[in-house]
Amino acid sequence: MYSYPIRERITPYKVAIYLLISETDQFYTSEPLTNNEHLYIAFLIQALIRQSNLSYPALEAFLLKYIRWQDLMMAFLQRLHSYRTTMEPIIRLDSSTPKKPVKDSFVSSQSIIGIYVRKLCLQYQLCSESERNQFYQEWIGYMEALPTENEIAHMKKKWNIDLLVDEDKKMTK
């Protein structure tokens, strides 16, 4: 008897991490990192992967505090915002991890990050059209959502990041 594997739901947070990985890979090919820099950014991405979910403002605050490369950060934020008004597929199989190790690539297929990308791409390919449409609606909500009180407390305690929401419901860092 054949059984289908349990699919994890694709969330906007997971896709935001995917986009960060993609931008990091492009950044890495244009501006090679030292071993220490490579380990540093890989650690940050793995820390984000281990989080179950973060609101967009919390993710942005985390990256603004810990990403050392302004070019990478700005490219990532621009890419996130470019998907705000489009239904264009965000995840593409052709941008998944390479099968053979590539010297000028940030992501290797056997790393935790490479496995994350491959798994997310496969999950996306298994989604029905209605699931994809539902995801895009969630994506719009994700980009406009505010952090919860629990998330604010967690970010302060674990990462020493202050997330403050003013009376106009806009994020301040």
Image (cartoon, rainbow, N blue to C red):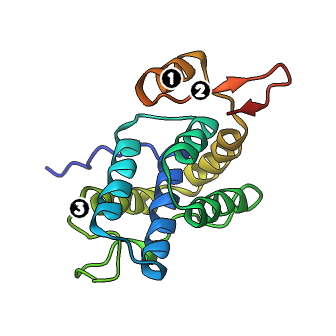
Task: State yes or no: discs 2 and 1 in contact (Cβ < 8 Å).
Answer: yes
Tell me which amino acid carries mark 2.
Asp
| Amino acid carrying mark 3 in the image | Ser
Residue at x 23% of width, y 61% of height: 111
- Look at the image and tell me whether residue 82 can be seen: yes
Badge 2 crowding class, 10 Å Cα cut-off, few under 14, some 14 to 19, many 20 or more, is: some
Q: Position of residue 132 (x, y in %)?
A: 58, 54
Q: Give how far across and how far down residue 74 sits, in percent.
A: 64, 61
Q: Residue under label 2, please give it.
A: 162
Alpha carbons under labels 3 and 1: distance apart: 29 Å
Residue positioned 44% across, 62% down in the render: 21
Q: Secondary structure at mark 1?
A: helix
165 is higher (above) or lower (below) than 14: above
Q: Which mark is residue 156?
A: 1
Between discs 3 and 1, the one toward the N terminus:
3
How many numbered marks are there?
A: 3
Residue extending farthest to the left is 1
Name the mark nearer the viewer: 3 or 2: 2
Label 3: which secondary element? loop
Disc number at residue 111? 3
User: Could you say which quadrant of the image residue 101 lies in?
Assistant: bottom left
Cα distance in 3D space between marks 2 and 1: 6 Å
- How dense is the environment of label 1, judged by Cα within 10 Å: few (below 14), some, or many (20 and up)? few
Image position of 6 with respect to 147: above or below:
below
Is residue 8 shown to the viewer in this render? no
Image position of 50 (left or right of 169): left
Mark 3–mark 2 Cα distance, whole angstroms, equals: 31 Å
